[in-house]
Amino acid sequence: MSAKPVAVVTGGAGFIGSHMADNLLAHGYRVRALDNLATGRESNIAHLAGNPDFHFERADVRGLEPGSTLFRGAYHVYHFAGIGDIVPSIENPTEYLSANVQGTAHVLERARHARVKKFVYAASSSCYGLAAVPTREDHPIAPQYPYALSKHLGEQACFHWQQVYGLPVNSIRIFNAYGTRVRTTGAYGAVFGVFFRQKLAGKPFTVVGDGTQRRDFLYVTDVAEAFRLAAETRLAGRIWNLGAGNPQPVNRLVELLGGEKVFIPKRPGEPDCTWADIAKITRDLEWRPRVSFEDGVALMLKEIEVWRDAPLWDPESIARATRSWFQYLGKPS
């Protein structure tokens, strides 16, 4: 019997990373996960405790030693480690460049020395800025804030390592991933964490603008499946957009959750619609989204108590938290 292939997942205790581990284990891999737990949670991988094919280490990718055994013998590396959120990136851009660019370079080096078969980078559709829709992979790059810039520079580093060192790389630009275990931090961020906590408290949903803005929401298990296929393909040097290809209005989410809503000002630098053109990834990887938006929200509602300890936002606290957003991104270009 041949040994199971080894896959390394950085950010493996995070939202997408933990689902990536589940997917890989279900497909016969041994998984080595690492996470510094800055935003990841050990509870996301608690169900894997005792699984002989799963190994977790608490580590920051920027502190990995050249001879790290985590990467030894690995077939594939999935790089999700990094930090997100718009406002904190505006307030502390150097930390975002350190985590998302320098951190990526450290992982690339470990992967290069381990001679992995494929490196798959979790990029962000935010690199496109205020994009035309549906958005193809050849759309001009126009990051609007430091988080978007840092993720794009991390992607460029990946392809530089392929060019110079021959490391086989693919990159997936994620549009709007959602699902169980979606991270909740002290920063004002993802709509699901905001709305679920408001629902638990019986408070109105704080809807940006008029709620007609649409987002290309893709359920997290569909995200993980796309990443595994991106590693297993013979193709390298590719960039794929990843979404459901079926953007949903924020008002539709409110309908599914049920409750009152209150409107807050539209924010500069945010598109009216995100919409991935997924023709390339469906053709190259024979991937299709499987989980409908309605089914995905229902799955999350079954675990709504997870958001009980999340921050509870209202229009006043949101205005305070996003002051720098309006200050820096609201200037005329």
Image: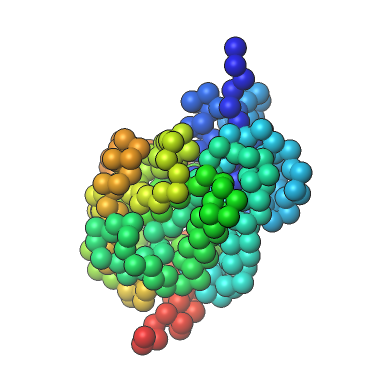
Among the 4 quarters of the image, the one containing residue 332: bottom left
> Which residue lies at the image location 53% right of the left edge and 23% below the top edge?
28
User: In this orientation, does residue 299 appear?
Assistant: yes
Q: State the residue in front, 155 or 307.
A: 155
Q: Quadrant of residue 269?
A: bottom left
- Residue at the far top: name it: 1
Provide residue 187's location: percent of width, then percent of height: 53, 64
- 113 with respect to 20 (left or right): right
162 to the left or right of 115: left
- Across and down, in percent, residue 77 comes to 57, 41
Q: Position of residue 91 (x, y in %)?
A: 56, 75
**Residue 88 left/right relative to 72:** left
Q: Position of residue 69 (x, y in %)?
A: 73, 38
Q: Count of labels shown?
A: 0
Q: Is residue 315 visible?
A: no
Q: Residue at x 31, y 35 (%)?
A: 286
